[in-house]
Amino acid sequence: MQKKQMLFQPIQIGRLKLRNRIVFPPMNTNYSNENGAPMELMMDYYARRAKGGAGLIVVESTTIDPTSRNHGAQSQFSDTSYIPLYSKLVDKVHRYGAKVSIELTHFGADGTVSSGGLEPAPSNVTSRGAQYAVHEMTIDDIHAMQKQYVQAVVNAKSAGFDAVTFHAAHGNIMPEFFSTLYNKRTDWYGGSLENRARFAREIVEQSRAAVGPNFPLIMRISGDEYIEGGRTIEETVEICRIMEKAGIDCFDVSGGIQASYIFSIAPYNLPGLHGFMMPSAKAIKEAVNVPVIGVGGVRDPELAEKFLEEGYADLIALGRSFIADPDFGIKAMEGRNKDIRPCLTCGNCFSEICCDRILTCTVNPEAGREDDFKGIEEAKVKKKVLVAGGGAAGLEAARVLALRGHDVTLVEKNDSLGGSMAAAGIPPHKEKISELVEWYEKNLTDLGVTIKKKCPYTSGMEDGYDALFSAVGAEYLRVIPGSDNESVITAVDALKHPEKVGEKVVIIGGGATGCESAEFFGAQEYQLQVHRLKNFDGDLDITVTHDESHHNKDVTIVEMMPALGIGMNEFEKRILFATLEKNGVKTMVNTKVWNIKDGVVRVIDKNAGNVVELPADTVILAGGLRSNSIETENTSVPVYPIGDADHPGRIINALFQAYCITRDF
């Protein structure tokens, strides 16, 4: 008999038995109402991950004090009035066999949404900058906040939660007391490590006394703060020993503080992303006698299993993977790893809540809409449908239409699927986009969709079909004088056929496509390793190594807007821009292209008004798209333009539009 994988073996946290070792960790969603209580959406969101196979669900960062917030719609559990709605959330999760904890916190000095007063802090220190004043807590303040924590633990138990998780990671009030970066006190709560741990230790001890020995207390803690002068794993290990003696039953090991959140919510291009926090988890696991949860860039079951078998952790937290595919757990348990929809690590989930919107997902249109989208129902009337174009919108439309039971045929002009996504998956660190295309092709094949490659749509092809979905994409505009020259190619063409690109390259357009194309052609020879932050200002501590297997071309990006990478995730931009700079890629913003002639791109500085000539063997168009359209002969067949064929946009826009149109078709 084949040995059962560790990932699916049960485990106990204190007296609490979990069905497997898969943890859906706390990630802010903005699914609370204006009072901080969970909306129906939040309940359905967590229940869906429980249904999908998670063993332990940890409800997102929930403040014990209504004046402490990190987001406009911050979850709260500051008094007993929240018990009824949280008990309903717990009930929905329990229906599917998962256990549920709730992460309790106070954001302290680094609360990003001010209540109008001074944020309480161990000392007069905050990573947000000198313009933000904080209030150094008195002993009475400390004791009052400890009581708030204990009461929240009692209330969580009353609501039916199976455990609570103290948020002692990412620069909240507990780790601010731990860290000498924040804690400059000279009383019993500062100075020595024992004193700096006292605030949290007393909360744990008082909570244990209040709820008894059988209710699990979990602590989420940053193994390394990833900032110069911050706490490192050696000191964290000692803190965990103290907390275990105080009554902690499990440690959830993350990393970073508010200033170094680039490590906490790591972008796709952070070097060495996959499992980079696991060594911290292993160090703590070797020092304590309670289970340890490992986290950090784990995106697939194989890697999760590897870390368990090699003793890095006892449980594995899979956050963004479960957002992208809520059935991650079930599919992994059934050995259907290729059926798991891949997370792109694009950071959209994080970016949305930073803009005070709800969490949504690029690849999963149902994420953040679980209260509205309860699955895809079979259509009462089955139809024969033609989808023209195998890019993002066409693939999603074909998938949903097939799930509805329609007879679907997809035609694609190229010899492979993906459309512009096929090119988007080529630049460094973007391989997950290629995996998404592969996932779609497998899904469509399994669903019985007829796929015809090297088969462009032609007028009249719609005959015999009940509907036509036009997903024929968009073309780059060639309005610049000289842009029709042979030396001028699109970013898609350049990435798919790099042999067409000469040594001197000018890229017109400094958005995501232009910057990532610049990295591919001109910024791979010198590789970056990002170690930590140098300071609260966000300066990166970087080591650069020469990779002789790559040769950089001479690349210049020209962008007419005031900045590059508009619309990109802030964290991925920081690493991408550092990579471009270290490799010598030249950039010009506030610059308009005048013309292209005789191997020279003439540009105008919009501020100074002077003309600059840029020699170019190849000019790459990476901005400005116009939707393609198709002409039909049979006007009785309805045509539905979707994706870039309707309005050029990002992958998330194409997938969501295609999903919405087809789920009720």
Image (cartoon, rainbow, N blue to C red):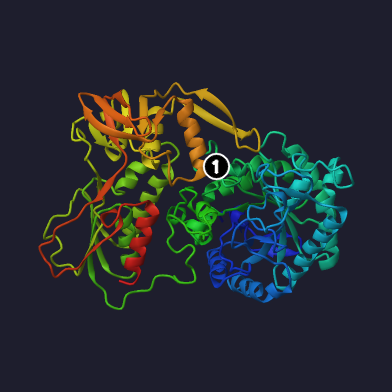
- The residue sitting at 52% across, 24% down in the picture is 545
* Label 1 secondary element: loop
Vertical position of residue 156 compared to residue 293: above or below:
below
> How many numbered discs sit on the rendered protein?
1
Q: Which quadrant: the N terminus?
A: bottom right
20 and 406: which is toward the camera = 406
Residue 560: % across, % down: 35, 38
* Amino acid bearing label 1: His
Tell me if residue 240 can be seen: yes
Q: Which quadrant: the C terminus?
A: bottom left
Vertical position of residue 148 compared to residue 234: above or below:
below
Vertical position of residue 120 compared to residue 482: above or below:
below
543 and 131: which is toward the camera = 131
Residue 53: % across, % down: 55, 63
Residue 152: % across, % down: 75, 66
Q: Quadrant of residue 10?
A: bottom right
Left/right of residue 632 with respect to residue 56 in the rendered view: left
Name the residue tied to disc 1.
Answer: 274
Left/right of residue 80 with respect to residue 327 in the rendered view: right
Outermost residue to the bottom = 380
- The residue sitting at 26% across, 51% down in the picture is 473
Tell me if residue 287 can be seen: no
Q: Quadrant of residue 155?
A: bottom right
Residue 95: % across, % down: 59, 74
574 and 46: which is toward the camera = 574
Outermost residue to the front = 608
Classify 10 Å Cα crowding around label 1: few (below 14), some (14-19), many (20 and above): some
Q: Quadrant of residue 494?
A: top left
